[in-house]
């Protein structure tokens, strides 16, 4: 009997876990398309992060306050976009949401050139940030719908490696615009950002031709195929909401890394070039260890324990950062390197455990909505972290660092406790989770 399209399962994407080629050029088509899309997306991010502030102020002509307020408002749009995209993915297909959101993000980059006043800038920034968050939720939903078990976390980990490497490459490429330092150079860089985002949408847009893919990207349908089955709302799932909240606290370490650490280094005897040194160290650690750290976190109990271990490392990093403020230049640099190493190890463990909990605690009948809520947590963390880090560690020094360490420890302990008995049973959910086909 010929199998129905909905029963078609992908070939497991990861066969040789240590092979670099499998990370950057997977054999399985869906993983390869996601990887190519991620490469272009991450390159655009590296360029954008490097030149955007100067582009907005020098080329578009906005004052720094307007830029700050506009991006702050846009952060709220990102929170809304992350959740809404997950809900929409269950209805129209996660791949459609992903490529449309990525393409709209690219168009928003072009629209920045016309945003010469505060209102226009806020509107364009909301579109750009909202679509960026929507793209992230849709990608997570695609992985949740198409893969099962350890393949989910493994593919996600490899995409994380690709992201870090290509953001770094984008940052290096954008240095050319900084060296030239002209309006034309910044405009060219932003055009490159837009072009890369549009290119990132293409590999995913073509996945509809994969047998069974389009069907699997939506929520399961009843036997008559009349409409998508009505899955439960993740907002009513107290376990999942708690998991998102706890992992969002842990995820605030990203704001610590991008905002808190550079500001803190400026208060120590260490040279400011240490900011770049620590970022390079982080990229290397993630590239080398993220996939390995993610193994086994498809077991939800192990995922919770992994988040707890991450919280220990992040708390230790906080105290090492604090101690760096008391040493001379040599001691400060040494402590900053140790702190960054602990921070990076905490990052890869926190991401690995967080992915495992996000995938395995989700109800497969509403995979998109659940992953949308998970990504909403990250969006909230990215909004809250910069001001929180500033008012604690930067303004109050050691005491503030200790407060952040305590927050990480509490969140990690909570995550481990939440799943200590494993995944909660759900009526009807088991039948919605597809079984993985044996490898050929």
Image (cartoon, grey):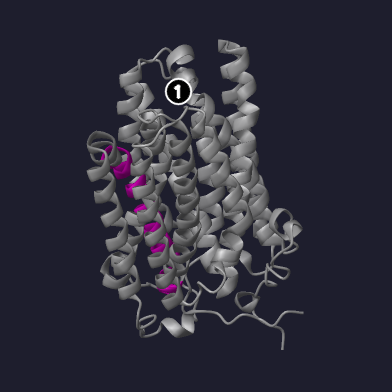
Q: Residue shown at 37%/72% (left/top)?
A: 230
Q: Nearer the viewer, residue 378 or 258?
A: 258
Relative image position of residue 388 (x, y in whole percent): 26, 42
The reply, left or right, for residue 362 in relation to residue 9 is left
Give the SS element for disc 1.
helix
Specify whether residue 362 is painted magenta.
Answer: yes
| Rendered location of residue 390, percent (x, y) | 28, 36
What residue lies at 39% left-to-right and 28% top-to-bottom?
Answer: 266
Question: Residue 358, relative to residue 95: is it above or below?
Answer: below
Q: Which residues are magenta?
A: 360-388
* Residue at x-position 69% and y-position 83%: 438
Residue nearer the viewer, 319 or 428:
319
Front residue (pair 159, 179): 179
Residue, disc 1: 53
> Where residue 126 appears, x then y in whole percent?
38, 35
Tell me if I can see residue 93 in this picture: no
Q: Quadrant of residue 440?
A: bottom right
Left or right: where 226 falls relative to 387? right
User: Mark 1, residues whose alpha carbon is within 10 Å: few (<14), some, or many (≥20)?
Assistant: some
Hey, which quadrant is residue 398 in on the image? top left
Residue 53 in picture, x, y percent from top left = 45, 23
Q: Is residue 208 magenta?
A: no
Q: Is residue 283 visible?
A: yes
**In the picture provided, is 374 more to the left or to the right than 36?**
left
437 w.r.t. 18: above or below: below
Numbered-mark total? 1
Rendered image quadrant of residue 346: bottom left
In which quadrant will I find the N terminus?
bottom right
Note whether 290 is above or below 259 in the view shown: below
Q: Please, what is the dominant secondary structure of the magenta stretch?
A: helix
């Amino acid at each position: 009997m010929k199998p129905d399209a909905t029963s078609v399962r992908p070939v497991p994407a990861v066969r040789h876990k240590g092979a670099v080629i499998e990370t950057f050029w997977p054999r399985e088509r869906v993983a390869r398309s996601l990887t190519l899309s991620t490469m272009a997306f991450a390159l655009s991010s590296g360029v954008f992060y490097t030149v955007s502030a100067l582009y907005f102020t020098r080329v578009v002509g906005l004052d720094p306050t307007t830029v700050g307020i506009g991006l702050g408002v846009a952060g709220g749009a990102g929170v809304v976009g992350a959740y809404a995209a997950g809900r929409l993915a269950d209805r129209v297909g996660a791949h459609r949401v992903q490529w449309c959101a990525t393409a709209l993000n690219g168009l928003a980059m072009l629209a920045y050139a016309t945003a010469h006043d505060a209102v226009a800038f806020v509107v364009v920034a909301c579109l750009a940030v909202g679509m960026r968050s929507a793209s992230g939720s849709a990608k997570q939903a695609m992985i949740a719908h198409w893969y099962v078990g350890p393949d989910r976390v493994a593919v996600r980990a490899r995409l994380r490696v690709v992201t870090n490497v290509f953001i770094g490459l984008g940052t290096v490429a954008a240095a050319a615009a900084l060296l030239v330092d002209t309006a034309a150079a910044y405009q060219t860089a932003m055009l490159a950002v837009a072009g890369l985002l549009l290119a990132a949408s293409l590999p995913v847009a073509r996945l509809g031709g994969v047998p069974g893919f389009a069907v699997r990207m939506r929520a399961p349908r009843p036997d008559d195929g009349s409409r998508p089955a009505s899955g439960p709302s993740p907002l009513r799932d107290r376990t999942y909401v708690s998991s998102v909240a706890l992992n969002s606290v842990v995820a605030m370490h990203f704001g610590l890394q991008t905002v808190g650490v550079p500001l803190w280094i400026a208060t120590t005897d260490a040279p400011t070039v240490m900011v770049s040194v620590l970022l390079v160290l982080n990229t290397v650690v993630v590239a080398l260890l993220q996939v390995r750290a993610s193994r086994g976190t498809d077991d939800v109990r192990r995922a919770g324990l992994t988040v707890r271990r991450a919280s220990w490392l992040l708390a230790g990093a906080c105290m090492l950062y604090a101690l760096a403020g008391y040493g001379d230049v040599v001691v400060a640099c040494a402590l900053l390197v140790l702190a960054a190493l602990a921070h990076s190890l905490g990052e890869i463990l926190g991401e690995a455990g967080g992915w495992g909990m996000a995938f395995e605690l989700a109800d497969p009948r509403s995979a998109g909505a659940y992953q949308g809520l998970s990504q909403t947590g990250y969006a909230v963390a990215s909004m809250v972290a910069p001001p929180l880090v500033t008012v604690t560690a930067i303004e109050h020094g050691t005491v503030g660092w200790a407060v952040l360490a305590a927050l990480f420890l509490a969140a990690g302990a909570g995550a481990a406790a939440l799943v200590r008995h494993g995944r909660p049973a759900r009526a009807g959910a088991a039948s919605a989770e597809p079984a993985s086909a044996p490898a050929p």
